[in-house]
Amino acid sequence: MPRSPPVLLAAALLLAACSRSGADDDRAQSARVKVFPASSASAGAPLLEAQARHVAGLRQKIARLRGNYTVVLDPPFVIVGDGGESAVRSVAATTVRWTRDKLKQDFFAEDPTSTVDVWLFKDAGSYQAHVRALTAKKPTTPYGYYSPEDAALYMNIATGGGTLVHELVHPFVRANFPGCPPWLDEGLGSLYEQAGERDGHIVGFTNWRLRGLQQALRDGRVPPFAALTAMDAQAFYGAGRGVHYAAARYLLYYLQERGLLVRYYRAAHEGHAEDPTGYQTLVRTLGEEDMGAFERRWAELVLGLSFP
C-alpha cells in the first residue's frame, strides 16, 4: 500500500485537531472552540505537526474557561478570543497580521522562536477572570500585557487595539535583540500604540502619552537622555515609569519624523556590544555635538505637538 507524503499526514493531523469536539462539549462549564488553520500551501510537515500539537494544548486550556472561542493560526501567533468569530478574525487580520508584517518589513528578521498565544478577551470581566484562570495571577494592568514566561499576550480587547500593537513588539524584540535596553524596547512598543501607514511603512502618531510628557517637561521631571538610556529595568519600570515611557516614545517619534528611526534601530542592534545603552549610537545618528542643546530643541518640539 502506498504511503501518504508526510506533509499530507501532518495536514490531516492538523485538520483533526482543529475540528475535534471535546468530550466535555455538552457540559455547562465547557467552552466550545472553532479553529481556523493558517494556509498549508507553503507549510511543511514539521510546521503542520507543531500547529496540531499547539491546538491540542490550547483545547486543554480553553476547557477551563467559560464561553465560546475562536482560534486563528497565523504563525508565529495563535489568536484566541471569546468576542465572536467575526471580531476575532478581524483583529487577527487587520491588527495582528498587519503589525507582524510591518514590523518585519523594517525592523525584525526573525520570528519569535516559539509560538506566541494572543488571548483576546471581550471585556474587562472576561479578561480579569480568564487571566486568573490561565495564570493563577491577577492582571496588574486593565489593558493587557505580554508574558515571556507563558509565550503569551493577554489582552482586554475592549480597551482598543493600541496596547495589542504595543505588546506585539516585545516578542519580536526578545527574539531579535537580546539585551535590548528597556527604553528602546518600551519606546518602540509605545510608539506604535497609535499607528498607521506612511508610504507603505508602519509609523506612530501622537497619542495619549503626550499630555503627561508635556507636563513633566514643564515641571523639569524628564531625565536627560543619557540617564534615560542608561536605566536598567528596575530604574525604568520604577518611580516615574510613565514619564520614562513617554520620553522614550517621543524620542523615537522625533527620529521617525526625520527618517532616522530604522537606521538608528539597526545601528543600535549592530553596535550593542560596544554601546549597550544605545546612547552613543543616538548621538552619532542625530549628528549632534551638543546633546543639551538638542534636548532643549526636542522639548520645544514636544511642547508644540497636539493630540488628538
Image: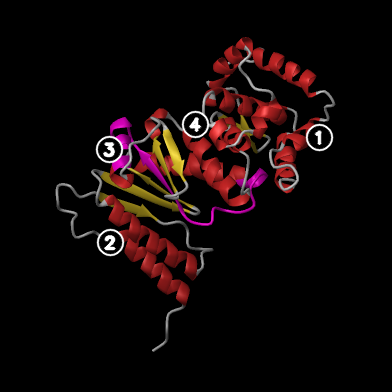
Query: How dense is the environment of label 3, judged by Cα within 10 Å: few (below 14), some, or many (20 and up)?
Result: some
Question: For residue 20, which numbered disc appears in the image?
Answer: 2
Mark 1 element type = helix
Question: For residue 129, which numbered disc appears in the image?
Answer: 3
Q: Is residue 158 left or right of residue 178?
A: left
Mark 4 element type = helix
Residue placed most toward the observer, 208 or 232: 232
Split into 4 quadrants, where in the image is the C terminus?
top right
Sequence order check, earlier mark of 1 and 2: 2
Residue lying farthest to the top in this orientation: 218
Q: Amino acid at mark 2?
A: Arg
Q: Which residue is depicted at the point 75% across and 40% down?
A: 263
Mark 3 element type = helix
Q: Does the rendering let one see residue 171?
A: yes
Tell me if residue 109 is in the magenta stretch. yes
The Cα atoms of the two marked residues, 3 and 1, are separated by 48 Å
Residue 177, placed above or below residue 218: below
The Cα atoms of the two marked residues, 4 and 1, are separated by 31 Å
The Cα atoms of the two marked residues, 1 and 2, are separated by 57 Å
Which stretch is magenta?
104-132
Residue placed most toward the observer, 207 or 198: 207
Question: For residue 284, which numbered disc appears in the image?
Answer: 1
Nearer to us: label 4 or label 3 = 3
Nearer to us: label 2 or label 3 = 3
Nearer to us: label 1 or label 2 = 1
Tell me the quarter of the picture where residue 191 sits.
top right
Q: Which residue is depicted at the point 81% across and 34% down?
A: 284
Q: State yes or no: discs 3 and 1 in contact (Cβ < 8 Å).
A: no
